[in-house]
Amino acid sequence: MASMIPRVPRLAAGLVLLASAVIAAQGGSPPAGKPYEGISVFGRPLAAAAAAPAVLQQLQQARRDFDVAPTEEHCIWLGRRTAYAGRYREAIAIYSEGLARFPASYRLYRHRGHRYISIRQFVHAIADFDKAADLVRGRPLEAEPDGVPNRAGVPVSNTQFNIYYHLGLAHYLARDFAKAEAAYRECLRWSKNDDSVVAVTDWLYMTLRRMGRDEEAAALLEPLHARMPLLENGAYLDRLLMFKGAIPEADFARSKPDETAPERAIRDYGLGMAALWRGEVPRAREHFERQARSDAWTSFATIAAEAELADLMRAQPDRAAVRSTLAAWMLCWNTYDLDLAAALFVQGPVATYYSSEKPGRIEGFDAVIAHHRGFGFVRRARASDARLWLEGLDVRGDGSVAFATATWCFDRAVASEAAAQRGPVTFVLQRAADGWRIAHAHFSNDPPPAAR
């Protein structure tokens, strides 16, 4: 059969492009170690850019300081400087080693949790921040020095603020908005300046809006104004003033000449949320897709844009093309969404499945869905730190049936050096009136390295 690359509608194309790095033909064996810092819920490998020389010099000094005196403080700074160099998994390992020496260090838990967020490991992040909150309870306020000082050289946050701020964010990204609100309310208690108040108000406002509590959210905006003396969080304030109506959306949408990548992410996410609340879903998706494809993948706003896109795809999966159907299939594995899995397979006795974990053929739609339930899939999804993606996807077929082959990869512990599980997979898909559905999937495991 001739090779077939299905055309994808414009609004669906962005979601498919999120997985472009993994569904483009790659070939060959992966390099030693992991060539990624994390994997997005869409199966996008997240690799760090080269660090600037000054950043590497600071990292080298932090390493020397730690080698001379491996204290809790030097461990924290070694981890922070390692993360600023884009080596997030290595930073997590440094914090983990530090916690083996200093098991009661709420600061090490706080910083490790932050980097778990960076690599989309929200379950691990929540566990770390919960532990940090337990350990810091009852202690006096503790200022936290900035790794990248602001123009005044004055830190605007403290350890307690950062624990609850990031705990709220981790719950927000994991879509547990009630727990996010509780964490942000506690964070406000530790917000001792306008910068801190603006930062936490921004995320609390969006949390309340996501829960349908619009009047409470609007009340948060009443005391905010454009003349607040901020050192760091001007982009957050502008977003809140746009939500308030004090800044026209058209003005907020214009990029500034000196705008940083994180500031651009904050703007794009805010515009997407404003469109979403108005019911303009295609416009919202455009903003979220643009940000999710950007290089600023460590920005909290970018991670939040990915979460919004995942919600939209799960609510209305795009099956217009084989590749978009398989992109949704990757998402269902990365969110353990049983409803999404059910929306992607052919219903009735036609559906068949061979698992790499279970002998024999699984026959019929009900049995296929039961198999997914046995792997931990649940209705309406759940947060998961395991990641599945496809490499070297090849699609062929005619107008009604398509065949797809790829290497499937499944990383149960992204932050570790443990190798991802890998193997070949074949899909057979059928075109129906509502788009492409999976009729058959066959998974196998690659042989162990010693047997190759």
Image (cartoon, grey):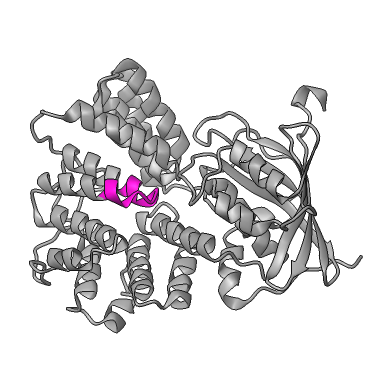
| Residue 142 location (% of width, % of height) | 12, 35
In the image shown, does 380 or 58 lie closer to the viewer? Answer: 380
Predominant SS of the magenta segment: helix
Residue 141 magenta = no
Q: Quadrant of the N terminus?
A: bottom right
Q: Image quadrant of residue 85?
A: top left
Which region is colored magenta? 169-180
| Residue most extreme to the top | 101
Residue 287 percent location from the top left of the image: 43, 71
Horizontal side of residue 34 vs 348, given as left or right:
left
**Image vertical order of residue 187 relative to residue 280, above or below:** above
Residue at (54, 45) in percent of width and height: 336
Asked if residue 343 lies left or right of residue 238, the reply is right
Q: What is the number of callouts on the image?
A: 0
Residue 409 seen in the figure: yes
Query: Is residue 57 something one can see in this rendering?
Result: no
Q: Tell whether position 177 is magenta.
A: yes
For the point 48% across and 68% down, which residue is it?
Answer: 290
For the residue pair 148 and 370, the one nearer the viewer reads as 370
| Above or below: residue 358 compared with residue 332 | above
Residue 69 in the figure: left or right of residue 301: left
Q: Nearer the viewer, residue 131 or 145?
A: 131
| Residue at left offset 14%, top offset 55% | 197
Outermost residue to the right: 1
Q: Which quadrant holds the C terminus? A: top right
Name the residue at 35% across, 60% down.
Answer: 262
Residue 331 placement (x, y as % from top left): 57, 53
Q: Residue 293: where, in percent of width, then height?
A: 51, 63
Snapshot quadrant of residue 217: bottom left
